[in-house]
Image: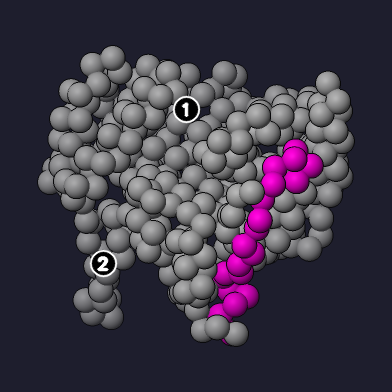
Amino acid sequence: MHNITLIKGDGIGPEITDAVVQIIKAAGVDINWDVQTAGADVIEKEGSPLPNRVIESVKKNKIALKSPVTTPIGKGFRSVNVQLRKELDLYANLRPCYNLPNVKTRYDKVDIVVVRENTEDLYAGIERQVDENTAESIKFITRQASERIAKFAFDYAVKNNRKEVCVVTKANICKLSDGLFLECAREISKNYPQIKFREILVDNCCMQLVQNPNQFDVLLLPNLYGDIVSDLCAGLVGGLGIAQGANIGKDYAVFEPVHGSAPDIAGKDLANPTAMLMSGIEMLNYIGETDAASRIKLALFETLNANIKTFDLSGNSKCSEFTQAIIERLKVLAKC
């Protein structure tokens, strides 16, 4: 029995969460879900989009599966995701991006892993209003955080039989901050002679990604660039509807889809649960349920190959229909 925190979020969050819980249950994994709510819907009742009970639940269970939470743009509360990462020191954001079967994209055989530093940079929230016409943000980069994320990237490459780590910065302009991140990556790379090391500027990286994404293997980036480039990579393989994510620290791990809460389609049975499911698959691998993870992934791939897809993937299946199709294939696999 696994005790895992389940954060349902808002918008389409509850729908895709319920879909993934059904699929994991159908795969025979015994999980005691500690259900928590967060986001805009709980502010009125509890005064915070991320009540302390959510943090305490993750600390107790060590693992969480989280659905999207709405983040206001330009006003309102700060991102729940950013707060979770800071509170739990989830310093590594892991974003595998690869082609799924029967999902039309411009490129084939893309297989990129984005490793993003998750706790500092401009996302550290060091901002002030200088005057009514001027605002200021401070880019915060430390040696400690840069070294540990570089080590995470190289360790991941070794463990997963990757060939290369490419560090992405703008060190030609941000010579001190990005320069420190690059210096740390260079030093850490010396401990991994079996992994090829390369460096590239972020603007050139974006151009190269849309010209020839197959040249890249593991990308290592500071927080802001990692956020942007990981979404670009998601676009290469079908969009945010299939983009998985994991936030990993020394003591805790939170798995979540990359996309937003899509409040415009909430409650309409139109959401695509694939990204949430892919995140759930990664979570199952992380906790040692590798057999169930493999069967769910196979059932998902067989469903897509049968041309059963949600509307965002040019299909005509509702969220509930797509979910049921995966469950039916899991039942068949169980008999094999």
Query: Is there a contact, CB below 8 Å, between mark 2 and mark 1?
Result: no
**Camera-side residue: 170 or 144?**
144
Image vertical order of residue 85 relative to residue 174, above or below: below
Q: Quick check: can you spot residue 31? A: yes
Q: Is disc 1 surrounded by few (<14), some (14 to 19) or many (20+) residues within 10 Å?
A: many
* Image side of residue 91 versus residue 213, left or right: left
Image vertical order of residue 256 relative to residue 83, above or below: above
Q: Residue at x 47, y 67 (%)?
A: 55
Label at residue 112: 1
Q: Which quarter of the image is occupied by the C terminus?
A: top right
In magenta, the rendered stretch is 25-44
324 magenta-colored: no
31 magenta-colored: yes
Name the residue carrying label 2. 126
Q: Amino acid at mark 2?
A: Ile
* Image side of residue 301 versus residue 130, left or right: right
**Camera-side residue: 14 or 205?**
14
Q: Is disc 2 surrounded by few (<14), some (14 to 19) or many (20+) residues within 10 Å?
A: few
| x, y percent for residue 330 | 81, 33
| x, y percent for residue 259 | 58, 50
Q: Quick check: can you spot residue 203? A: no
| x, y percent for residue 28 | 75, 40
In the displayed image of the protein, which residue is found farthest to the top?
Answer: 194
Label at residue 148: none
Secondary structure found at label 1: strand
- Looking at the image, is mark 2 or mark 1 earlier in the sequence? 1
Scheme by which the image is coloured = one colour
Image vertical order of residue 89 relative to residue 164, above or below: below
| x, y percent for residue 241 | 65, 44
